[in-house]
Image (cartoon, rainbow, N blue to C red):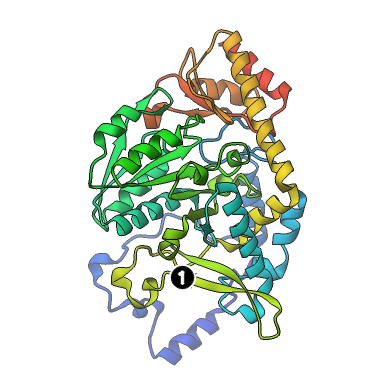
Amino acid sequence: MTSTFRYLPDTKQDQQDMLDCLNIQSIDDLFSDLPSSIKLTEELAIPKAIPEPELIKKMQQLSLQNFHANQYPLFLGAGTYDHFIPSVVNHIIGRSEFYTAYTPYQPEISQGELQAIFEFQTMVCELTGMAIANSSMYDGFTSVAEAAALAVSTTKRSKVMVSQAVHPESRAILKTAATGPGYQVEEIDLTTDITNIRDMQEKADDQTAAIIVQYPNFFGSIEDLLEIKKIAQEHGALLIVSANPLALAILQPPGKLGADIVVGDMQPFGIPISFGGPHCGYFAVTKKLMRKIPGRIVGQTTDAQGNRGFTLTLQTREQHIRREKASSNICSNQALNALASAVFMSALGKQGIRQMATLNIKKADYMARQLTEKGFSVNNQSPFFNEFVVTLPVSASEVNHKLFEAGIIGGFDLNKDYRMKNQMLIAVTEQRSKQEIDQFITILEGL
């Protein structure tokens, strides 16, 4: 049967019966209304259909050509990181009541999902030091653009300033998103590995709606949020901080340093690399901005009998009934990955997450010190978290090729996005062993 039928086993007679029912001669007649100028005149350049068992074998053979973090030690970060994920995470999110769940509009049948989201919001607030967090965003990169839109809507100003030390993909999405509302995006220069405070001061003016920085920044370095907040306050602008949630287990929360909006990506907390997605963004604000927050918020309440319960309590209603006044087009949330992050945080607890963050700092520091002792130049002048920049004797692509031959996935080539020739961004998470780090350095020495 498998050699005869494909996925939808309709026979020639089935097809003819359908054509007769429609009173047409051939399948091509279904497309007779289409202009010939837009019709394809040749066969599609795709292989002929094959039976499903053969297709599965073919796809498995192709998948074996991939190399991943379970095979090779991974020193590539730049926004997606190789972190430990407790087995309980997949056990929970693999339950049918969770992995098939959509946005819980009906609280009477969604209490488990609603409570999980409520706990997620609570833990995000604890990490960021902010008053309110929503039920999640699609990822940390688009969250930056959503934060900018909120700032422009709130301040009624026309310019957003963003540090060049913010992730290149975040900045690219921000510029794309700005074309709709029509606000200007101006980039702030760098001073080696951090934002140039003087350039920020010179470019800020009375039309600046927000200043956006990353914490730690794209190069792994820690920005001085207090100093940046002073500049934002001087010009009546909001401070938007894109923060790594794992780093916040050790660093001072942005909310305690004056941030108005804190966004980021929960990928370090229980979400696998998965070739770059899907992720889960978080979005936290001060109480003053609560009614401007995109997406929705799950709140805690009591039912008629006084029992604890959860429900959707706040949405930016303009998305539904006054679309011309909407500040966001986000109308859903990343519930399954938010649940994964909530389970991760619950499983490790405050001390476990702090210990994990500490290992990231210590292992990255060990590798940077070893490289320095071997004569390599580490560019970071400011304290860094689990990433740093090293100058290489040859191009980063050549180094990565040599590393791959030795069974190691190397770092991020900075030449593409920053024109930083022969410089590599290296990520060292708690997953990397001393042996793996030393082997990486030995290969560099060989160059």
> Residue 241's x, y, as percent?
45, 44
Look at label 1 and name its amino acid.
Gln
Residue 178 in view here: yes
Quarter of the picture holding the C terminus: top right
Q: Which image quarter: residue 362? A: top right
- The residue under the point 29% across, 55% down is 155
Compare residues 28 and 280 and report the one nearer the observer.
Answer: 280
Q: Secondary structure at mark 1?
A: strand
Residue 100 in view here: no
> Residue 358's x, y, as percent?
67, 32
Q: Which image quarter: residue 387? A: top right
Compare residues 349 and 80 and report the one nearer the observer.
Answer: 349
Count residues near mark 1 (Cα–Cα under 10 Å), then give few for <14, some for 14-19, many for 20+.
some
* Residue at mark 1: 315
Quarter of the picture holding the N terminus: bottom right
Compare residues 271 and 229 and report the one nearer the observer.
Answer: 229
Q: Which image quarter: residue 251? A: top right
- The residue under the point 63% across, 14% down is 370
Q: Against 338, is 348 above or below?
A: above
> Residue 426's x, y, as percent?
55, 27
